[in-house]
Image (cartoon, rainbow, N blue to C red):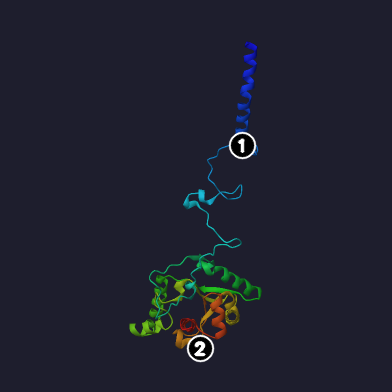
Amino acid sequence: MIHSSASGAPRRCLPLLLALLLLLSACGPSNPPAETGAPARSDAPVTTQAPGRTDPCTLPATDAPATETPGTTAPEPLEDESWKLLLVNASHPLPEDFSVTLKPLRNGHQVDERIYPELQQMFDDARAQGIYPFINESFRSAQRQQEILDKYIANYRATGLSQAEAEAKALELVALPGTSEHQLGLALDLIAEFDADSTATWNWLKENCWRYGFILRYPGDKTAITGITNEPWHFRYVGKEAAKEITEQGLCLEEYLEQKEHS
């Protein structure tokens, strides 16, 4: 009897075991996950980025890279080039807040450092053609400008003129401090380095200086406009574009600026 009861128990339990196995099979996944070796759980943020790239959204806002159109670069801010055409004369004194960074040259001369490359190129090209310009005057401080004016006044006083007459005569040739282009660092008085006669040098500069951004500032036929007598030695930097237009149209700086204002 013992044998009969023990052998009958497994038979009665077999249908129950089969039913349980069928139920477990129906609830389980049809395809088990592939083995990747990676941990089953990850705390990484969800991203649609390609593998190996950092999702910008996970970076602090201040460190997020700028989004640009592929194949383009962000435009650089335009340089303020108004300094090239700053008008300084008896009617337009130097702005009170004016400042300039100077480039030292030979013989103690100085110019606005921004014009140095073009100035050097102009001198190099002139010398290659047998013309040797020499800087006689460049940047002047207000103090230096006053010293020159005082010297002219004293010379006229020595001829017997009154103080008022001497000042009036001196101001025909020398500008008051604050009204001279030489205080800009953009103007140069040029002569021939090895020749007492500077005519050939002035002629070459008059014909070619525009290529380097310079103009003959005070031509004789513009005295009524500039207020300055003919100065074939005085050249002023205005930038290549303006120099080309001024030279082609036969203008002085005052005329050019007026034309631009009304165009």
Above or below, 98 against 39 in this view is below
In the displayed structure, does residue 53 sit left or right of residue 62?
Answer: right
Crowd tier of the residue under label 2, counting other residues whose Cα lies within 10 Å: few below 14, some 14–19, many 20 or above: few
Q: What amino acid is found at the position of numbered circle 1 in the picture?
A: Ala
Above or below, 115 against 3 in this view is below
Residue 210 makes an appearance in the image = yes
Q: Secondary structure at mark 2?
A: helix
Q: Give the percent coordinates (x, y) of residue 183.
A: 44, 72
* CB within 8 Å, label 1 to label 2: no
- Residue at (65%, 12%) from the top-left corner? 3
Q: Give the percent coordinates (x, y) of residue 238.
A: 52, 76
Q: According to the image, label 1 marks what residue?
A: 26
Q: Give the percent coordinates (x, y) of residue 147.
A: 40, 73
Query: What mark, if any, has residue 221 been given in the picture?
Result: 2
Residue 72 image-quadrant placement: bottom right
Assign the N terminus to one quadrant of the image: top right
Q: Between marks 1 and 2, how big is the CA–CA gap? A: 106 Å
Q: Give the percent coordinates (x, y) of residue 263.
A: 48, 83
Q: Secondary structure at mark 1?
A: helix
- Residue at (39%, 72%) from the top-left corner? 95
Residue 162 makes an appearance in the image = no
Above or below, 122 against 218 in this view is above
- Residue at (39%, 84%) from the top-left corner? 169
- Residue at (33%, 82%) from the top-left corner? 163
